[in-house]
Image: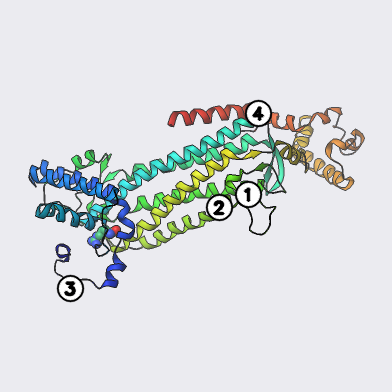
Amino acid sequence: MRHIKGRLQKAADEKVAAYTSSLPFDWRLYRHDIAGSIAHARMLSKHGIISESDAVIIVQGLESIQQEIEQGKFEFRAELEDIHMAVEARLIEKIGEVGGKLHTARSRNDQIALDLRLYIREAIAQTIGNTRELQHALVNLAEANMDVVVPGYTHLQPAQPVLLAHHLLAYFEMLQRDVDRLECCRMRADVMPLGSGALAGVTYNVDREFLARELGFDRISQNSLDAVSDRDFVLECEADASIAMMHLSRLAEEIILWSSAEFGFIELDEAYATGSSIMPQKKNPDVAELVRGKTGRVYGHLMAFLTTMKALPLAYNRDLQEDKEGLFATVDTLLASLAICAGMVSTLKVNAESAAKAAGRGYILATDLADYLVRKGEAFRNAHEIVGRLISYAVKKEKSLAELSLAEYSNFSPLFGEDVYSITIESSLAARDTVGGTAPKRVAQAVAAAKKALGQVN
Ligand code: ARG
């Protein structure tokens, strides 16, 4: 490539060219790269840096290159270092010398900073869209099962009964925060870096505000050194994606547990389950397991690029090229995992009976019993102690709370009366009538609020 060799007389060794080329992965930025170049050419001509007629030829050339790429007619030549060189080389091939004017007042350093920011804005919009789909699926499942009770767990031990809808809406909340985080990241990525040149700014009278407007950016960068070497927005996107994947891994884990014979609260649709090559009876939750498993990789991309960025001196260093593969893989994985989870959630069947049965086991109403004594005048700590002793008695006798006689209750506290038998799963749920609690009335409000939130943003 004569026009990038500059002082170098020798072509790069073949192995070196292959080692340093980013084209095998950054070709994906072609749309962003071309959009940036078109805006740049227009800006150059608007300010008399190149002629209007040159700009028209350049823009047409770039548009036809985009078509070639989209029609699969573009040859990504391995010896070209990156997408920027590939597009520029083809432009010069197509329109001749005038194509060489495009790179006036620009460097690949500010060009890649721009392309990545354009990419991230789009990736975030898609990710938010897929997150909304999953939220819809969760809310729909909640709404279709408003009277289903499941055991609520702490330490994976049955703790207190909760509505299935309440449990599902917990994930809705997590995903709301994921969207918030991504929106913050999008805001910080919304900065136009062109005009920073290689590192110090450019010697031409460039119109950076015009470029920002053309490309739909909110702001322009304020320091050229920072603009070409900042990848915070990449790290932030990967961190946000890691947290989102962590949420999906928890959902996936519960789907795995809940679809097991031991729990049996849900059944996966066959389209979201796999068979075993050896055990004919199996219906395996491999899809959910892979969501859980892929979380590790997404964390890995974040750690890898944090490590790459550590202690890098200003300004651009080639190390920064390592940003792309991890970022693309992160976005691809998160997008696919969100879509898969949405499909899995919207097709699974709820087994209300097994859930209710499980919710009735394990002295799950013990807290309600203690609260009962408190309402009769006992101090909570004493009530806790009394119920603890009562439960260990019931365990020994192999009786449920409902099977204990009033005489047996009375051995533990004189405050117990006939009304102790009115403590049921239903009363337990209804009693948790706080904002954010599992009382059916509150959960119905939460479902309505969730639907409204989705309606407003979609
Ligand atoms: N392929 C490079 C990257 O992804 C583009 C910028 C190259 N700049 C340079 N001076 N070599 O970071």
Circle 3 — which element?
loop
Q: Amino acid at mark 4?
A: Pro
In whole angstroms, how far apart are the C-alphas of marks 3 and 4? 75 Å
Q: Are marks 2 and 1 in contact (CB under 8 Å)?
A: yes
Q: Which residue is mark 2?
A: 292
What is the three-letter code of the residue carrying label 3? Lys
Q: Quadrant of residue 317?
A: bottom left
What colour scheme was applied to this rendering of the protein? Answer: rainbow
Q: Secondary structure at mark 1?
A: helix
**Regarding mark 2 in the picture, which secondary structure is present there?**
helix
Quarter of the image that includes the C terminus: top left
Q: How many neighbours does mark 1 have within 10 angstroms: few (below 14), some (14-19), or many (20 or more)?
A: many
Q: Which residue is mark 3?
A: 10
The amino acid pointed to by label 1 is: Ile
Camera-nearest label, 4 or 1: 1
Q: Quadrant of residue 316?
A: bottom left
Q: Quick one: 356 or 179, which is closer to the camera?
A: 356
Sequence order check, earlier mark of 4 and 2? 2
Disc 1 from disc 3: Cα separation: 58 Å
Q: Which mark is residue 256?
A: 1
Q: Is residue 129 left or right of residue 407?
A: left
Near mark 2 (Cα within 10 A), the count class, few <14, some 14-19 or many ≥20, is many
* Figure quadrant of the N terminus: bottom left
Instruction: Residue 170: tell me if it is visible.
Output: no
